[in-house]
Amino acid sequence: MSKAPANAAAATYDRILDAATEVIAQRGYSGAGVQEIIERASSSKGSFYFHFPSKEKMVEALVGRMSDKLVETVQEAMEGQPTPLHRVAASIDTLVSTFARQRKVAQVLLLNIIGHGRETDRRFLPMRERFSQMIQEELDAAVSADQIPPQDTALVSQMWVGALHEVILRWLLTGQPSPLTNATPPLQGALMRSIGAEPASFTPAIAASARRRLS
């Protein structure tokens, strides 16, 4: 008998976060009011504060949900790839194509919340660290498999995440490249060459990911 109320509460929770995505993408962090989020979610102030003690906690939950979905999507794309380099190439393609399809998510995660104070910005550190760790693990595997020379994979993975962030942020601000996925092949090539890998080491992953986007 308690299942229906629990499902209703979960649905309300999701509606609030969905509405917050829309409002923050449109108005930015400072301009996104709790009342507008509540109205767009067809909810109530009591429901909002039942799930989230504050706007800041709501944003923390939103970032967590978005990053979980991104990580899951990237991990699925990496499964079945034949080598570590194929897996990191697939991860780059998937991350870029996902943001290209979900511009509002990119706006919320990479543009409209960052820069609103140290505590707000720190909420993004775990997300960046998760992607850095995923990349580092594959680069370590590539070193072990003699695909690339030994190197500081922790530093390299952080640099890769920074490069991806910069390319996507520029697209959000300027609309270039158009479409965003045009950046994928040169970005993959530049990042792979930065670790001593030749294009032939991961070109099949590019072809496979391109077929997925067209299907």
Image (cartoon, rainbow, N blue to C red):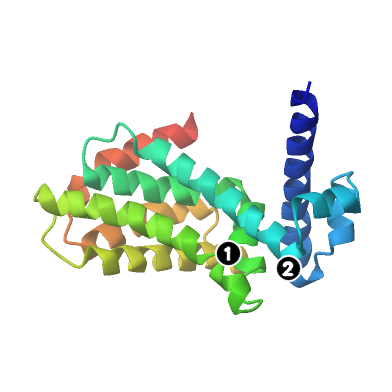
Give the number of the disc on residue 128: none
Amino acid tagged 1: Leu
Q: Residue furthest front?
A: 1
Location of residue 131 in the rendering, given as x and y in whole percent from the top left corner: 41, 55
Determine which residue is flagged by label 1.
110
Q: Are marks 1 and 2 in contact (CB under 8 Å)?
A: no
Location of residue 153 by image quarter? bottom left
Left/right of residue 188 with respect to residue 94 in the rendered view: left
Query: Quarter holding the N terminus?
Result: top right
Marks 1, 2: nearer the viewer? 2
Left/right of residue 195 with respect to residue 144 in the rendered view: right
Q: Residue furthest top?
A: 1
Location of residue 128 in the rendering, given as x and y in whole percent from the top left corner: 45, 62
User: Between 63 and 77, which is closer to the camera in this rendering?
Assistant: 63
User: Between 147 and 154, which is closer to the camera in this rendering?
Assistant: 154
Q: Residue at x 38, y 47 (%)?
A: 91
Left/right of residue 89 with respect to residue 197 in the rendered view: right
Give the number of the disc on residue 29: 2
Q: Residue at x 78, y 37 (%)?
A: 9
Location of residue 85 in the rendering, given as x and y in whole percent from the top left corner: 23, 47
Camera sees residue 29 = yes
Look at the picture and state if 14 lies above or below 45: above
Helix, strand or loop at label 2? It is helix
Real-space Cα separation, disc 1 to disc 2, in angstroms: 12 Å
